[in-house]
Amino acid sequence: MVYKIVKYGDPVLEKPCDAVEDTEFGSSELREFAEDMFETMYSAKGVGLAAPQVGVSKRLTVIDCSVGEDPEQKLVLINPEITLKEGSQVGEEGCLSIPGFREDVERAKKATIRAWNLDGESIEVTGEDLLARAMQHELDHLNGILFLSHLSPLKRDLIRRKIKKMIKAGEW
């Protein structure tokens, strides 16, 4: 099932998410939700999607930098935490919840995440470049932070004004 992606302005995007409970691990509901999130992400041509982006305030994100080309790259991160950041990279980022806007954002070049998989097993993932960027971007979502927060106040204000105009015109 493809979910409707929540757009900027919806309060679910700017509040920290609740942890996935121990009782939810291994459930068919959790597995189905993760698969539906992958399907939603692929249909929107994204490399990452966090649960709040489909209106669910849970600490779960899916990432696939191959955009569905390599099943080995599919990642489900539940209750993730960043344990290590190294280096620095600046690159263009966009967000499925803020369509049509892309800006350069500085992130760590390498990041290590500790999380749990769908079965409730502890996993550790280290990524560099695009994977590191995607993991940091998606974890921000789980903490109620949008990529706009990483922009200068001027750029952030310009984007917000454009979105307000689009809302008034019925284009958002």
Image (spheres, grey):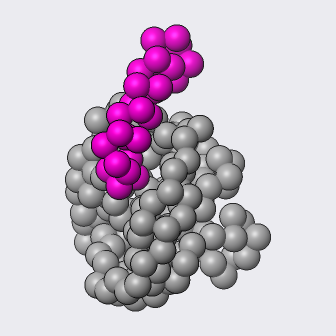
Which residue is pictured at 49% across the width and 68% down the height? 90
Q: Position of residue 145 (x, y in %)?
A: 30, 52
Residue 162 counted in the magenta span: yes
Q: Is residue 117 visible?
A: no
16 relative position to 123: left or right: left
Most extreme residue toward the front is 154
Residue 127 counted in the magenta span: no
Q: Position of residue 123 (x, y in %)?
A: 40, 87
Q: Is residue 52 above or below residue 25?
A: above
Which residue is pictured at 34% across the width and 60% down the height? 140
Q: Which stretch is magenta?
A: 146-172
Q: Is residue 15 above or below residue 112?
A: above
Dominant secondary-structure state across the stretch colored magenta: helix
- Front-most of 150 and 80? 150
Most extreme residue toward the right is 69
Query: How many dots with numbers?
Result: 0
Which residue is pictured at 35% across the width and 39% down the height? 154
Which residue is pictured at 46% across the width and 17% down the height? 165
Q: Is residue 95 visible?
A: yes
Q: Is residue 100 above or below residue 172?
A: below
Q: Position of residue 93 (x, y in %)?
A: 53, 56
- Front-most of 143 and 116? 143
Q: Position of residue 85 (x, y in %)?
A: 34, 83
